[in-house]
Amino acid sequence: MEEALAASVRPYIADVGTAKVDLDRQERCGFPEVVYCEGKSLETIENILRSLLEAGQDCFATRVAPEQGAHLQKVFAGAQYNEIARTLRIPLPAVPIPEGKVVVISAGTSDRPVAEEARVTAEWMGCVVEMIADVGVAGPHRLPAYRDRFADADAVVVVAGMEGALPSVVGGYVDCPVVGVPTSVGYGASFRGVAALLGMLNSCASNVTVVNIDSGFKGGYVAGLIARRLARARNGS
Amino acid sequence: MEEALAASVRPYIADVGTAKVDLDRQERCGFPEVVYCEGKSLETIENILRSLLEAGQDCFATRVAPEQGAHLQKVFAGAQYNEIARTLRIPLPAVPIPEGKVVVISAGTSDRPVAEEARVTAEWMGCVVEMIADVGVAGPHRLPAYRDRFADADAVVVVAGMEGALPSVVGGYVDCPVVGVPTSVGYGASFRGVAALLGMLNSCASNVTVVNIDSGFKGGYVAGLIARRLARARNGS
Amino acid sequence: MEEALAASVRPYIADVGTAKVDLDRQERCGFPEVVYCEGKSLETIENILRSLLEAGQDCFATRVAPEQGAHLQKVFAGAQYNEIARTLRIPLPAVPIPEGKVVVISAGTSDRPVAEEARVTAEWMGCVVEMIADVGVAGPHRLPAYRDRFADADAVVVVAGMEGALPSVVGGYVDCPVVGVPTSVGYGASFRGVAALLGMLNSCASNVTVVNIDSGFKGGYVAGLIARRLARARNGS
Amino acid sequence: MEEALAASVRPYIADVGTAKVDLDRQERCGFPEVVYCEGKSLETIENILRSLLEAGQDCFATRVAPEQGAHLQKVFAGAQYNEIARTLRIPLPAVPIPEGKVVVISAGTSDRPVAEEARVTAEWMGCVVEMIADVGVAGPHRLPAYRDRFADADAVVVVAGMEGALPSVVGGYVDCPVVGVPTSVGYGASFRGVAALLGMLNSCASNVTVVNIDSGFKGGYVAGLIARRLARARNGS
Amino acid sequence: MEEALAASVRPYIADVGTAKVDLDRQERCGFPEVVYCEGKSLETIENILRSLLEAGQDCFATRVAPEQGAHLQKVFAGAQYNEIARTLRIPLPAVPIPEGKVVVISAGTSDRPVAEEARVTAEWMGCVVEMIADVGVAGPHRLPAYRDRFADADAVVVVAGMEGALPSVVGGYVDCPVVGVPTSVGYGASFRGVAALLGMLNSCASNVTVVNIDSGFKGGYVAGLIARRLARARNGS
Amino acid sequence: MEEALAASVRPYIADVGTAKVDLDRQERCGFPEVVYCEGKSLETIENILRSLLEAGQDCFATRVAPEQGAHLQKVFAGAQYNEIARTLRIPLPAVPIPEGKVVVISAGTSDRPVAEEARVTAEWMGCVVEMIADVGVAGPHRLPAYRDRFADADAVVVVAGMEGALPSVVGGYVDCPVVGVPTSVGYGASFRGVAALLGMLNSCASNVTVVNIDSGFKGGYVAGLIARRLARARNGS
Amino acid sequence: MEEALAASVRPYIADVGTAKVDLDRQERCGFPEVVYCEGKSLETIENILRSLLEAGQDCFATRVAPEQGAHLQKVFAGAQYNEIARTLRIPLPAVPIPEGKVVVISAGTSDRPVAEEARVTAEWMGCVVEMIADVGVAGPHRLPAYRDRFADADAVVVVAGMEGALPSVVGGYVDCPVVGVPTSVGYGASFRGVAALLGMLNSCASNVTVVNIDSGFKGGYVAGLIARRLARARNGS
Amino acid sequence: MEEALAASVRPYIADVGTAKVDLDRQERCGFPEVVYCEGKSLETIENILRSLLEAGQDCFATRVAPEQGAHLQKVFAGAQYNEIARTLRIPLPAVPIPEGKVVVISAGTSDRPVAEEARVTAEWMGCVVEMIADVGVAGPHRLPAYRDRFADADAVVVVAGMEGALPSVVGGYVDCPVVGVPTSVGYGASFRGVAALLGMLNSCASNVTVVNIDSGFKGGYVAGLIARRLARARNGS
C-alpha cells in the first residue's frame, strides 16, 4: 500500500535536487506554487521556475533580491521584475481578464513595499486592484474621504505598522473580509512589527484576520483568493 | 458642519448609558453587532439586546457565562443558550435557509469549546456547517481520511492548540481560504496559545490567515462571511 | 552637614512605623500623597490617613478593596467609597469649586472601572469631568457623534483595552494632550493589556502619552494636573 | 451623504500620490503635521514639505538623515538642519516670541541626541527650553544641585536609558507634568530601551507619563503643547 | 577510582529517600544547608531538619506555609516561626553574639514580607540588622533623612518593586556592596517583578548586584555573608 | 483515488464522536496511542480507552486528575492509578519482562511528580527504571556519589527546574543520550520553567535534547524508546 | 583528599592557556570533544586541535568560518572543510565502516546549511546518512512519497524553520526517536526560530525531542549517538 | 534652603558641559567615578578624564573602542589601554600594593573579553586577581582540578554564557560571595545572554548574585569592593 501511494504521488512532484516542486498544487489549491526566493541559490530558483514552466504554470516569485531579479530576467524571456515589491513574474501567453476587486489600503508611506507586494500578488491571481495609500488613523478624516473607492471591494488588504489600528477602522466600514498585514515599520516599542501584529490580532472588528509581519504576499493571496472565487461565482463559473 | 455630522449619525446609535449600540452595522457590514459579554453587567447586556431586538435585528452574544445564560433565557423568550460554545442567540421569526458551506476542523478533543463557538457563529450567519474533530497532525492518516467532507468547503476554520500545525496541512488540501484559530490548549511551553499562534502566523501555506487565541467567534465569523457572500453570488443575489 | 539635612527634612515626614508619609508633597508637587492600598494592612492605611488628616490634607486612596472600604468608612466620618473605581476619599470641609475640564473617553463597557478611577481622581483634584463610554474604533461613527462633548477639553484621558487604538483616533481630533490608559481587558493575544500598551506607545498621534496598564489613577492625575494648572492660569492664580 | 462627506473633507488633504498631507491639522490640533522622514523617499518628503509651505504652514521634519538634510537644505531656502537631533525646520518669516517654559533633563551624556530632538521640537512650538544634562540617579547630589533651573517649568521632559529611574525622582520635585522618554542607551539586559520603558511606566511618581523609546520628538511635543497652552492661558489668549 | 570517590563522599550526605541533605556544606560554604519548603511534603521537611539537627547544625527553613510552620513548631521544640517572613528556625543552644551590620532598606510598605525574609536570614547568620522601610524614590527627601542609619553598613539589601530604582540611589550613597531584591509588587506593566528586575540589572551604580524576584532570602544571605566575613576579619578570626 | 485512500485508512481509526483513536499507531510507531486526559470529558476518555482495549492494546493515560482516576478504576477492572504521576494504566494480561535500562535523575525534591511521570511511562514501555532524586548542582558532590547507578544506563532522563543545569553536568558523565525535562518548579525569574527550558536548550553537553516544560511523559517516552530498541537489538529481536 | 583529586584529574586535561581540552571525554562519553569555533582565535583553535591529535583522537570542529577553514587546511594536512555545513574534520587514518542509519529530513531549501551540519556530524560518528530535502507540510503529499527512504531509520533528524510542524508529522510515521532542529529561517513573526522552536517543543508526537535553534550539530550528534549504539548492539559489540 | 543645598553641592561636581563629573564619589563610595565610553564623544571623554586628574583621582574607563584608546593614549601620558578588555587606565604615581584576592573563573574561551574586563577592574581597585579559564560544566572534572586556586578567594567572579550554570557549581565549593556575569556568548535560544542571565538568577546556590549581561566591569567592581574591604579589615585599616 505504501509503495502504491508513493508511486501515485511522485509524478506530481518535480524533484530538482535541493527542492521538490509541487506541480499538483494548481489542481488542488487553485493556484500554482509560488517561489519564495530568500535563502535560495540562483540555481535552485532557476530549476524550480523551469519545472513550473514546463508544466505550463504561471510562475510567480517573491522576496526576489535586485541582483536575483536582474539575473532571472536575462534567463527567462518575458520575466517581469517589480523592484518595489521585489517580485518576479513570468506570465503565460494567455492571461485571464481581471475580475474580482481587491483594495489595498496602507497606513503610511513607509508601508509601500509591503502594500506593493500585496497588489502584485492579487493581480497575478487575476484580480483588479485599487491602491489607497497613507490614510492612517491619526488623520481621522483621510480614510472616509476615500470610502467610495473601497466600499465595493470583494476583499480588502490593510497594511499598517506602528500601532496597527487601521484594519479595525476599515473593518467598521465594509461588509467584506479584511486581511490585516502588520509591517515592521516603526521604532522603539514597535518591536519590528510586534505592536502592529498584536493590535490587529486584538482588533475589535469581527471581519479582520491577520497574516505574518511584512507578508504582503499572503495578504494579497488570501484577498485575491476570496475575490477571484466570488467573481467566478458571479459569472457562474 | 460638526454638529450636522453628529446629528446625522446619532439616530443610528442606541445610547443605553454604559453602552452605545451600533444599529447601523447590519447595513454597513452585513451583520448586526454581536454582544461580547465578558466583563459586562447583566443590566448592560439586557439593555443592548433589547435595543437590537427593537431595531428588528437577529441577536447573537458570545462569552456568555452559564449564570448569565440562564438569566437571559428567562428574560428573553426564545433565547437559545449553547453551554459548550457559551453563546446565546435570540433568532428572528423568519430565519433564512442556510447556504454556503463552512467546515470546522479541530486538532484535539480539548479544542471543542472553541470549535463549537466557531460553528454556532457561522450557523447564525446562515451557513451550513460541517464539524470534523480530533484529526491533529500526529496521526497523519486521520485528516486525509475525511478529505471528502471538507474538499468542497467555501471556507475552512481550523482550530488547534499545542504546535498549531494543522492549518498548514489543511491549507495544502483545499482551494478556499483557511482561517486558523489558535487555542490555549497545551501545557508548558505552549504559553497559553502563543506557540499555536506563532505556528499559524508562520504557516507555509499561502491560504492561511489567523485570528486571536481562542477566538472561535472570529474564526467562524470570517469563514461565515466568505461562505455567505459566495453563496449569494452563486444565487445571483 | 548630613545631620543638618536630616534634621531639616524629618519634620515633613510622618513616620508611622511601616510607612513614611510625605507631608511636604502638597507643597512640592501641588497635591497631597495618594494612598495606594493594595498589599497594605488596614492598620497601616489608617495610620497614613490619620497623619494626612492631622496635617490638614485632603485624603484620597486607590485600589481600596470593598472590605477595606467598608471598614474605613466606619473609622473615618465622611469618608466616601466608590465601589466601581475602588477609591476612598475623605474630603476637607471646604472643597474648591471645580474648574478645568477633563474628558474621560472609554472604548468598551468593560473598561468602566478604570475609566471611573480616572474620573474620581480628576474630580478630587478639582476638575469638572465629562465621561463618554463605549465609543471604540470598530464603530467609526460613534466617536465623531460625541465630538462636541470633548472638543473643548483641557486634557483627555482615553481608556482602552484590546488593540488600544482609540487614543490615536482621539488624538487626531483635539488640540490638547491625550493620556492613554491601556486596560487588561481582552483575551488571547491581548496578553493582559500588553497589546493595548504597545498600541498606545506606538500611536502615530503626536499628542498621546501613556501610563501603566489599568492605571486609571495616573491617567486621571496627569490630566487633572494639566487641566487644573490651565484653569488657574486662566484665572490668573 | 457619503459623497457629501468626502467632498467636504478632500480640500483639506493635499494628495501627493504616495502621501496624503493633512492640511487641516493646524486648525484641529493646534500645530501643523510633522514629517517623519525614516523610510520615505526624498521625492515624497519634498512633495509633502512643498504642500505644507504652499498652505502657509511652519514645516518641521524629524528623523532626517544627514544626506537627506543636506539635500533638503539645497532645495528649500532657509531650511535649518540640526545634525544631533536630525531634525529639519523651514521657519515662517514671522516666528512668534517664545513663551512657556519646557525643561529637558537627561540622565547620561549618551542620551543627548534624544534630548536634543525634544528640545528642537519644543522650540519649534514656540517655547523657551532649558537643558540639564547628565544628572542620573547614581550621583544623587547632581539633580538637586540644579533644582532652581527646573523648579518653575511648565512641563518637564526626562530622557533616560538604562534603568530609567530619573523621571520618578524628578517627579517628586515638581508640581507640573513630567514626560518620560526612555532611550535605547544601555547594554545587556537593557534590551534596547525596554528596561527604561518599563521603569518609567511603573514609576511611583503620579505625574509621570511615558512615550515611545527614543521618541524625543513626542516627549518634546507633549511638553511643548502643555507649556504653550499654559502660556497662552496666562496671557489670556 | 570512581568507587573510591563515591565512598569518600557518601558519609557527608544524609540520604532521606526523597532528599539528599548536604551535611558538608557548613564546612565547605560556611553555613549549613537552608531548607526551601515550597513543594516539599511535611514528611520530607521533617526528615531533612532531623538529619541536620543530628549533625549538630543550626536549622533554617524558608517559604514555610503557616500550616507547615504550626506543625513543625509542634514537632521540633524551640522552633521559631516568623509569619511575615514565612521562615522557621531551630536555633542551637549557643547562638553567637551578632556582629557585622546589615541594613535592609525597602521602597514601599508592600515590600515588607520580602524585606522581613532578608532580615531574618541575616540575623540567622549572626549579623545585626537595621530595617528602614518605605523610602522609595518618589519622595526624594525620605532616603537621605535616614542616611545616618545606613552609612556605616557592612552590606545593604535594597528591596523594591515597581520600577526598582531604589538600589541605584542607595548605591550612590554608600561604600559597601548593595544587593538588590526586586519584588513582584506592582501592577500592569510591572509584569510580576520583571520591571524591577530589569531596573536593578541596569543600575548605573557600580556596587549593585541582583538576586531573583522576591528572593529576600538570597538578598539577606549574600549581605550576611559579606558582613559576617568582614566582622570576623576585623576581629582577626 | 481520494476515496480509495479514505477507504483504506478508515478501518484503522476508531471514530468515537469527539475523538478519532489511532489504532494503527502501535504498528507504525511501536507503541499504542497514549491518552492525554486534561480537558477531556470522562465520557470521551472512557470511549477512547474502550476502543483501545477492544483492539487489544495496552492502555496508558497521563494527566489524569484524582477524581478521573477514581472513576476510571471503577469502570475498568485492573486499572492502576499512580497519584503522584497522575497516570493510569490498564495492563494487558501478558506483560513483557522489563529490559533496557532507563535512569531518571531529578534535581530537587519538588521535581518528583514530573520524575514519577517519566518513570511510570518508561516502565509501561517495558524498561527497568532507576530513580535518583535530589542531586542538583548546588551540592556538587552529590551527583558523582551516585555515578555507579547511572553509568550503565541506556538512556537518562534528567528532570530539573530553576536554572536547569543538571542535564549539562550529567551529560558530561555518560555515553548515552540524555533527555532534559525542564520543570515549572522555581519562583520569580524562573518564569514557570522558561529559565530551566532555556538552560537545557543551551546546554554545552552534546548529548542533551529537550522536551516541553513538565513533560515527564515525553522524557520517559523517548528514553524508553531508545532503551527498548537497544535492548531488542542486543537480544537480536 | 582535594589535592589527590586534582592530581588524578589533571593528566586528562590538556591545558593550552586559553582552553582546557577534555581528553578523557572519548572514554567517558563515547566521542572526543568537538571544537566550537565561533569566537575563538585561530591560535586557540590550533592549540586545541593539536592536543587532540596528539592524544590520537578524531578531530571535528563546527561553526568554522571560511577564512578559518582555509587557514586550518593549510596547517593540518588532510583536514576536510565543508563550506555549506561550515565544519572541519581531520580524520584518523583508520576510519570505521559506517553503520547505523540516520535520516536527515528538511522542510525547505533554505534549511540546507543546518541539515548539512547534521549530516556531516552523524557521518563523523560513523553512521550512514540519508538526506531528504524540501518536504515541508504545505505540500502534504511530498513527505509520504519518500516514506520508503526513512521508514527504516535508527534515528531521524528533522530540520525546519517557520512553523516547525514537520517533526510532528514525521513522528507519526516512524518507530524511532525524532530529533527536531528548529532553524532561524522565516520572517516576521518567526522571531529567528522561536516559532519553530515552540512548535517542536509542543509537538503532539511522543517521540520528538528538540535541540537549540540552528543546532544542526547537536541534532546530528544525538541521532548519531542513538544509531551508533544501536548498530553496535546489533553487532554484539 | 534649596539654594543653600545647591551651593553646598556644586563644588563637588565638575560641570564640563555635556557631563557632570561626580568628584565626591571617592569620598562617598570608596572609589572614583568610572568613565563608560560607549556613545560619548572623544571631547567629552577627555574633559571628564581631565577633571578627574585635576582632582587627583585614579582614572579608569571602560568600553573604550580601539580608536578611542589610541587617541587617549596620545593625549594622556601614562595611559594604559587593554585591547581585550577595552579599558583605559591613567594610574596615579603611587599605586597601592595589591591586597584582597579576587578569582575570575570563565566557562568558555569565548567569554574571555568579559572576564578580562572583570580582571582589569579588580586590579585597578587594588586586588590580586587569579584567572581560571574554560572550566565549564560539560567537562565536570575540569573545575575541581583547579579548586586549590580558588578555595581561598575573598570573592569570586564567574563569567559564563550559554546555559550559565557555572556560578551554581562554583557556589557549592566556596564560602565567599560569587558574582555571576552572564555573557551574550551562545547562539539560537541563548537570546544574546538571556538564557545565561535567567540561569544565574535562578541559581540554587545561596551565595550567587548577578549583574547585567556582559558586564565584566560590574562583576569585577563588586568582587573588588568585597575583597578590598576584607583585606583592609584584616589589616585593621
Image (tube, coloured by chain):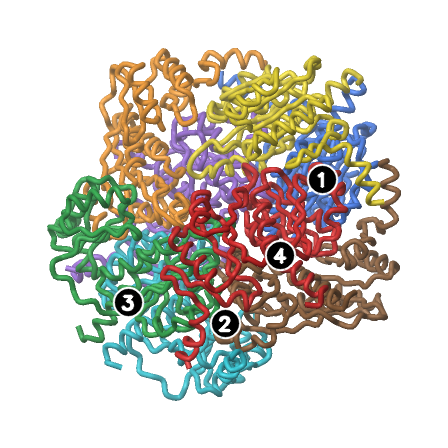
Chain colours: A cyan, B green, C orange, D purple, E yellow, F red, G brown, H blue
Q: Nearer the viewer, mark 3 or mark 4?
A: 4
| Chain ID at mark 3 | B
> Looking at the picture, how far across and down is residue F89, in whole percent?
52, 52
Say which of marks 4 and 1 sits in front. Answer: 4
Q: Where does label 2 land, which residue?
A: A36
Query: Is H209 above or below relative to G191?
Result: above
Residue D89 in view: no
- The relative height of residue C192 versus residue C97 in the rendered view (above or below) is below
Name the residue tied to disc 4: F126
Same chain for marks 1 and 2? no
Above or below, G116 relative to C149:
below
Chain letter of the residue carrying label 2: A
Location of mark 1 (residue) = H169
- For this view, does E234 lie left or right of residue F74? right
Q: Tell me residue G16's x, y (percent).
A: 84, 51
Q: Amino acid at mark 2?
A: Tyr
How many residues crowd mark 4 within 10 Å: few (<14), some (14–19), many (20+)?
A: many
Which residue position holds label 3? B226
